[in-house]
Amino acid sequence: MTEAREWSRVAQTSAFHELMQRKKAFIIPATIFFIIFYFGLPILAAYTTVLNFTVVGAITGAYVYAFAQFAMTWILMHLYVNRANKWDVIVDRARQEAAEAKTSGGSSA
Amino acid sequence: MSNTDITAFVFFVVIIGITLVITYWASKRNVDASHHYVAGGEIKSWQNGLAIAGDYLSAASFLGIAGAIALTGFSGFYLSIGFLVAYLVVLLLVAEPLRNLGKYTVGDALTARFNTRTVRSASALNTVAISMFYMIAQLIGAGALISLLLPISFNWAIIIVGILMTVYVVAGGMVATTWIQIIKAVLLIVGSIGLSIAVLSQFSFNPIALFNAVESDIGREAVIPAAPSGLVPGLDSISLNIALVLGTAGLPHILIRFLTVPDAKAARSSIIVATWIIGGFYLLTPILGYGAALIVGRDRIEQADPGGNLAAPLLAEALGGPFFLAFISAVAFATIVAVVAGLVIAASGAFAHDFYTNVIRSGEVTEQEQFRAARLTSAGISVGAIILALLLQGQNVAFLVALAFAVAASANVPVILLLIFWKNFNTIGAITGMLTGLISSVGLVILSPVILGDAAIFPLESPGIVSVPLGFLGCYLGTVLGGRGAEREREQGIQRPYEEIYVRANTGISNIEEEIKGATPSSEQRTT
């Protein structure tokens, strides 16, 4: 079971806690937002006619809503990738902290 | 043969020739199971980005959506938005954890936590089912398209495409498949941009003028959502959207794409490339669909194919004559063969790697045997798909794709999410969840108007709104009612410690002994 101890050593580092906190702080709100924003369109379209207004020419509210979903996807994708690339640095720190904990823990045991 | 036939024939032969040269080149690199399944993890990120786009933009996207928008207007555009936003589910929730846990297949990720053969078998069953539905849809599309363009019968067209995909996968594995996807993606981008420019040139390059023409010539109902018509049709539309958005995150051939690059950073860069291409393509679909409705006419589109699948090729013919028709048809053909090849790899991974290597042989197989099993099952799956496609011809392409998505959303997604995020999840829960999702989505489609018509017992055409919650419920009830509880399973070694899965899925650390040595690790020590 030495391997299990190694994993929990990583799990207990402050860097890993920080990683999970940052991940959750972005992923949970982003997911809730895009799901609500996405399903808003089919639900509104299925039960109401509020999206039938005209924006410019024959471009209707439904199309504007639909195009906004494209913008949302691209924006969230870039936000995610930028953040995830920074998370890698925290993962490296977690490795390092776990290794240090091992060295000091190993010498006292 | 007419002139059109000859031009089309030349295009087809050129494309087939190029893909066979690639396959020959790739076959020299396709030396082991790792190359067969994930190209040895050696694909560059921009290449993988193009290949993801290639996997994503199937015949359903190119032919199906253009046809749906041409015939039904805004409602057809739902498919575009659904496929695109679906990517966020993959990206935010599933891609990195699965990449961190998996090796060749979805089953690998599941068994990283649940060390039992039954979990692997159930996952393999789902992958094979999803890939088969999808593949049959693509093959039927290929048959319809090629028989329209060349003096070849529907059946022969399916057989030719089927043989090609078998050759690509068996000889060239994932290396060949990836390059064929890349070529196909480039052709598809060039083709759809060319077609869009040709359409817009008729409307002084003003998309709004195109929409205006649709409103005045076809009617306002073409640019607004279908009028609300009661509870059940509304639920059906929402149900379809659930399957589209969640289902992508359960499609094996999309998920294995993240395993073909060397590290997580490369996986992310490939996502940037893929999302821009995919989104850009889907933005063009209203131009293609409306263009076809205005320039070709709804009647002619429906006459050529009641499902509307020939809208884009007919539009090309109307705008650019036989040459353009031949080019667009060749693009559609490349689209189909590339996607089916990717599906064969995903299905063969489930069969050969999950089922044969790890369930039947308990993982005690030499590298050579694994590789042989991978190629043999690829051939077997191809033949099976060809036979089923021949038997099931006449079905609407989009319906079968929708079924694949429903199974993926209901059978794969709940178990993948809970695997990563639920500590008390156990093996019985995983198995019940996967089977409930699979059986309920297929069962509800059989009971639906799609199969039973007016005698339908289940009122919705798309099962997602019921089968996805059932998939989650199956996971939950299986865990709570059956089995030994996660803690007992861990003591017995059936389940890995959750802490390990949690750390692995979130960090990408895979070989803990190596990576945490007690010395100061350098930052190059990134996981692969």
Image (tube, coloured by chain):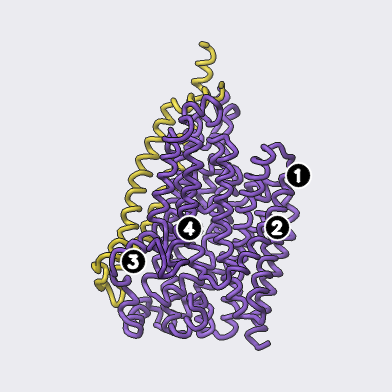
Chain colours: A yellow, B purple
| Amino acid under disc 2 | Ala
Q: Nearer the viewer, residue B256 or B444?
A: B444
What residue did someone put label 2 on? Answer: B379
| Amino acid under disc 1 | Gln
Question: Can you give x and y, in whole percent of width and height, for residue B324 in the image?
Answer: 57, 81
- From the image, state whether disc 1 or disc 4 is nearer to you: 4
Residue lying furthest top: A108
Q: Residues within 10 Å of mark 1 (few under 14, many from 20)?
A: few
Q: Quadrant of the N terminus of chain A?
A: top right
Residue for point 44% across, 58% down: B444
What residue did someone put label 1 on? Answer: B368
Label 1 SS = helix
Subunit of label 3: B
Label 4 SS = helix
Question: Can you give x and y, in whole percent of width and height, for residue B17 in the image?
Answer: 71, 69
What residue did someone put label 3 on? Answer: B233
Q: Which mark is residue B405?
A: 4
B229 lies above or below B519: below
